[in-house]
Image (cartoon, rainbow, N blue to C red):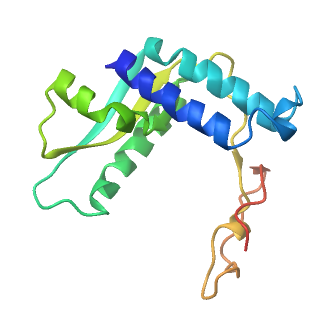
């Protein structure tokens, strides 16, 4: 299953690398954030077949499919990732399985009434976990009006920030 999903990972990354400018503009500057991300992503997909653990988050349907049906699975995925990090492991939730889903279903004999919601790779990180960085809450949490952050949406002391968040 890992080797099969690795094929999907390569397809996704090749498409993204080509269409999102990772090989031109700031992506060619060796130390740019875009180039560093591209190197990390390339290493990840090149080695996907050898990840120590691959978890498929699967939802068994008991009613007709709907756009929100996978929503109940994702909190469990998040808890898995948080538990892994607390134990010193790293994890990534992906949709790589989607590009090889029928072959994966055939291989693992997954019934048609089951939705593969996510593929999650787990293992020891190549380096150490760095500090968690977050987008400032004011750029993500809005109150009564889009773009207006409520008074209670404050970042905890010591929060390390990354990008500024989505456009307002």
Q: Quadrant of the N terminus?
A: top left
| Residue 98 position by quadrant | top left
Q: Is residue 147 shown left or right of residue 15? A: right
In this view, which residue lies farthest toward the top?
50
Q: How many marks are shown on the rendered structure?
A: 0
Q: Is residue 122 shown left or right of residue 43? A: left
Query: Residue at (31%, 63%) from the top-left corner?
Result: 67
| Residue 152 position by quadrant | bottom right
In this view, which residue lies farthest toward the bottom?
144
Q: Quadrant of the C terminus?
A: bottom right
Query: Residue at (77%, 49%) from the top-left corner?
Result: 162
**Position of residue 161 measured from the top left corner of the image (x, y, whole percent):** 78, 51
Foreground of the two, 128 or 22? 22
**Position of residue 135 measured from the top left corner of the image (x, y, whole percent):** 71, 56
Query: Residue at (13%, 42%) from the top-left corner?
Result: 112
Query: Residue at (38%, 49%) from the top-left corner?
Result: 74
| Residue 136 position by quadrant | bottom right
**Position of residue 14 measured from the top left corner of the image (x, y, whole percent):** 58, 30
**Position of residue 29 measured from the top left corner of the image (x, y, whole percent):** 89, 30
């Amino acid at each position: 299953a890992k080797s099969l999903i690795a094929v999907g990972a390569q397809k996704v990354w090749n498409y993204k690398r080509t269409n999102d400018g990772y090989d031109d503009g700031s992506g060619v500057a060796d130390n740019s954030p875009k180039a560093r991300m591209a190197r990390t992503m390339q290493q990840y997909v090149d080695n996907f077949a050898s990840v120590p653990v691959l978890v498929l988050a699967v939802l068994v349907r008991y009613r007709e499919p709907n756009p929100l049906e996978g929503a109940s699975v994702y909190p469990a995925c998040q808890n898995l990732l948080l538990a892994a990090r607390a134990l010193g492991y790293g994890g990534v939730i992906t949709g790589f399985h989607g590009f090889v889903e029928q072959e994966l279903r055939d291989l693992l004999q997954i019934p048609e009434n089951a939705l593969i919601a996510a593929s999650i790779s787990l293992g020891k990180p190549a380096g150490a976990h760095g500090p968690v960085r977050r987008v400032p809450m004011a750029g993500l949490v809005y109150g009564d009006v889009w773009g207006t952050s409520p008074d209670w949406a404050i970042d905890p002391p010591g929060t390390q920030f990354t990008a500024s968040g989505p456009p307002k």
